Every structure is written in C-alpha cells, then in structure tokens.
Amino acid sequence: MDISEYCLDTAVRAKAASLLMPKVSGAQKNAWLEHAALLIEEKKDSILSENQKDIAAAPDFGLTPAEIDRLLLNSKRIGEIITALREIAAFPDPVGNIIESAVRPNGIEVQKVRVPLGVVFFIYESRPNVTPDAAAICIKSGNAVILRGGKEAIHSNRVLAGILSQAAEETGLPKDAVQLVQTTDRNAVGEFLKMADKITVTIPRGGESLIRRVTAEAAMPVIKHFAGNCHVYIDQFADPDIAERVLVNSKCQRMGVCNAAESLVVHRAVAEALLPRLANALLQRNIELRGCPKTCSLVPEAVRATEADFKTEFHGPVISVKIAESLNDAINHINSYSDGHTEAIITTDLNSAREFATRIDSSAVMVNTSTRFNDGGQFGLGAEIGISTDKFHARGPCGIKELTTYKYVVYGNGQIRE
C-alpha cells in the first residue's frame, strides 16, 4: 500500500469509528482510561526500553538538549501519564450535556446539546507523553483521533499506542477510534491535510515551522499556536521576593516548553533597585540577558538586544529584557511582541493587576504567579491536547470541552410553522 492509500484507509476507518463514538457511554470511556493506565503501569519497563532507543538516536536527528528532555520518558513522567489518564476518567462526560434548554411559546422545546467534533488529526513532535494524553482527551470527548508523532519518538509512540489500542479492544471501544500513523514519511501529513471530508479538525503541536506548514496546507480548520514568547512584567508595586521567585520559575523550571518566559519587562521606577537582583538570579542559572540600552547600563553582563530578540521564543538559556516607562508602556510593548500565549504581572496593586489583565491580549494572564501554570493539568482540565492562541474555536489550554461543539435538538408534539 502506498502512502496515499495508507492515509486514505486510516482516515476512512477513523471516520467510521467517529460515527460510533457518540453512542459509547461515559462508563465505557472511563473503563478504557482506567485499563490503559493499568497497562501502562504494568508495561513501564517495556516503555522505558523503547524510549531509550529514541534517546540513543536523538543525536542523529540533531536534537538540542531541550528537545531531548522533551523526548525523555522516566518513571516520574510515566507516573504523570498514569495520573492524567485517571484524572480524565474522573471528569464528567461532556457528550450529551444539555448546555441550554427553553420551551418556546408554541410549545416546542429547544435544546442546545454538547456533541463531539468528529475526527481529530493530531500532529506533534518529540514528546511521547503527549500520545496517551491526546488520545485520552479525544476519546473522553467522544472523538476518534489519528495520532501523528515525530520520527524522533517513533519507538516510544508505537509501544504507547499499542497499549492504548489493546485497552480499547479489551473494553469494547471502536477499534479504530485511536490510530497512530505508523509511517514517518513527511508526505503522509500532506495527504491527511487534504481530507476535509473525513477529518474534522487538525491540531499541530510542535515547532513554528510545522504549525505554519499545517496552517498553509490544511483543508479543514486548525487549532494552533505558532509560538510562545511569554512575558513577565515587574510592576512598580511588585514584591521583590515574589518577583524573583516567579521570574526564575517562569524562565528556568523547564526552558524548552511553550509557557516558559522568554521576555522580562521591568517598570522604570524599580529598575535601578530591583533589576540587578533579578539579573543576578538569572545569571547564576547561566541565563544570557539581552537587554535594551537602559538594561545594559544597569546590568554590565547584559548584551544589547536586537529587535529580533524581543520577538524570539528562545527555548533555552536566553531572555530579552526591557525597561518600561510606565504600566501603559509595558502593556504596549508586550502586546506588540507577544505571540498571544501567556503573560504575567508581578504587583501588589490591584488597579495595576486589573489594568494588565484587561488590556493584555493573550490566552492567559497570570497575576503574581508563574507563566508555567498555563497548562491544562494545572488549570484543572486534566491533560490538554494543546494551547491555542486562536480565538476560534478554542483559546488557551484545550481539554475535553474544547474538543466538543454543539447541536440543537428540538422536541415537539406536532407543531408546524404557520
């Protein structure tokens, strides 16, 4: 079977499974999640062994240390996968939920009912823990999913997808509701992106080049974010201890992820007193500072930032630094350079916090807390399939409800329109 035939066959089977999924009960979906969690726990050694094959091959793909970190599975991360599956099982089943209901003057009852999207084509790169997370969210929300992981994680993804399929078969789910694209041929992605009659939505999760390619080629809607140039703004009323703690966590806790801080903005009124302390905390952790002229005058170790630096998602030990003349200047700077992902303000002033939260045009605004919390699990959504910076159809972390839509169901007893 050639690539075109393989992709068509996969999509046809996913479409057929998606038409059966709305009838699958919440109890049955939860049984699949619980069984999948149990099998992953039982087969942990096998998963780690396959993951090591991917880690060993990583240098051949030119992966950076941050990318290898995303690829790595260990006991802790497998434990997090299991926890996420069980958390999703504990969530209410959204399918069939009546969002609104009203009886019209003529006696007809109009219900707005939550339903699955259909078939989700999910494309992601070197993060194998995403495989069960994405499958879990899609199945819990009543969808069928086609998973297309990166070549860097093919061994890890195959063993995980095999476990998910085994769990589906043993709990009576439609067998093609979860499918992993077995080929690493890049042409397969292009084939799937043509199939708007079979695939409802595509969700790419990875580097900007991947997401731009998908957006350009997809014949169906795409839920996406291009980049995550996230900012931490230190207001003139900031608590210095909170400022340092939140900044360091936002930037350094895990640098290769989309909600890590890439830009620091400091109010002019506190720059002289506070910026050297913040800079020192970052320098101690081997973070390079690329700053505006005022930053460089206060922090000798900083290098002069270019215009491109203020726009860049570094994914590593570099941060841009800007001294703002006012809260308004800070907000304008952030809205100009942000990718609409996550921005944080550190302040003790409620008016500053409200102004910032109101005017910042991003999917999440953090007040006195880390940008790293823009995450489905941290927001109480269970796992997430991605973070959207779009405003249609979903924004921010996309969990179970974000993978549903609605339809109207109308009940009557013979009424006709006059």
Image (cartoon, grey):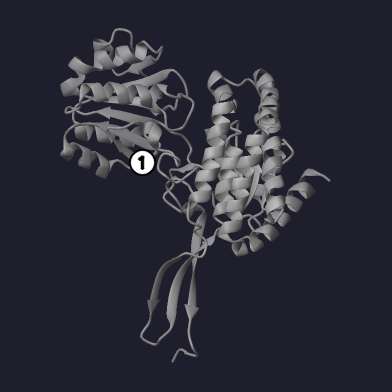
Examine the rendering and report whether any part of residue 153 can be seen. Answer: yes
Q: Residue drawn 48% across and 78% down?
A: 410
Q: Quadrant of residue 277?
A: top left
Examine the rendering and report whether any part of residue 217 can be seen. Answer: no
Task: Pinpoint residue 185: horizontal percent, then vertical percent.
Answer: 73, 36
Q: In which quarter of the image is residue 25?
A: bottom right
Residue 249 lies, with reference to residue 378, above or below; the image says above
Q: Residue drawn 46% across and 32% down?
A: 258
Left or right: residue 372 compared with residue 360: right
Q: How many labels does the image show?
A: 1
Task: Pinpoint residue 11: horizontal percent, then vertical percent.
Answer: 70, 53
Quickly name the residue at label 1: 364
User: Callout 1: few (<14), some (14-19), or many (20+) C-alpha neighbours within 10 Å?
Assistant: many
Nearer-the-camera pick, 239 or 299? 239
Task: Pinpoint residue 75: horizontal percent, then vertical percent.
Answer: 58, 27
Nearer-the-camera pick, 325 or 289? 289
For this orientation, the residue located farthest to the right is: 1
Tell me the quadrant of the picture where the C terminus can be found.
bottom left
Left or right: residue 350 compared with residue 255: left
Which amino acid lies under the numbered mark 1 shown in the image of this protein? Ala
Residue 276 lies, with reference to residue 405, above or below; the image says above
Nearer-the-camera pick, 259 or 45? 45
Left or right: residue 112 compared with residue 329: right
Q: Residue drawn 26% across and 41% down?
A: 357
Tell me the element at label 1.
strand
Left or right: residue 17 compared with residue 204: right
Task: Pinpoint residue 40: horizontal percent, then vertical percent.
Answer: 64, 37
Residue 26 lies, with reference to residue 361, above or below; the image says below
